Image: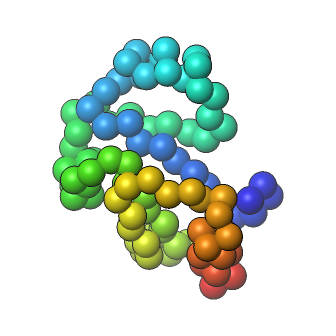
Amino acid sequence: MAGRPFVILGVDSSEGPEDLGGFLDRVKVNFTILFDPDGSTTKRWKIYGLPTSFLIDKSGKIRYVLTGTKEWDEKESVSLVESMLQQ
């Protein structure tokens, strides 16, 4: 998705950067991590299980929600993202 209007954001709930630092030293990610140390965003978005993934369109509307793991590089997942990018 490089060079496309597509952004990945991670949200770490109920922890601060100091809690995640060791993990990020071992597991390199190439996307921004936002921190929700008091869990307020998690509550506001009604997230009851982790991980939870949201696909949000360019107007800011949540179009897809998945609780649980997902292989985002599988054909079906890529097709879903591609279809949203074409709208």
Q: Is residue 85 visible?
A: no
**Residue lying at 57% horizontally and 51% vertically, measured from the top left:** 8
Q: Nearer the viewer, residue 18 or 68?
A: 68
Quadrant of image for the N terminus: bottom right
**Image coordinates for residue 50, horizontal then vertical, percent:** 33, 47
Q: Nearer the viewer, residue 76 or 4?
A: 76
Which image quadrant for residue 7? Answer: bottom right
Residue 55 appears left or right of 83: left
Q: Is residue 14 above or below residue 8?
A: above
**Residue lying at 39% horizontally and 64% vertically, measured from the top left:** 66
**Image coordinates for residue 20, horizontal then vertical, percent:** 43, 22
Q: Nearer the viewer, residue 78 or 43?
A: 78
The mark tally for this picture is: 0
Q: Is residue 22 visible?
A: yes
Q: Is residue 72 above or below residue 11?
A: below
Quadrant of image for the C terminus: bottom right
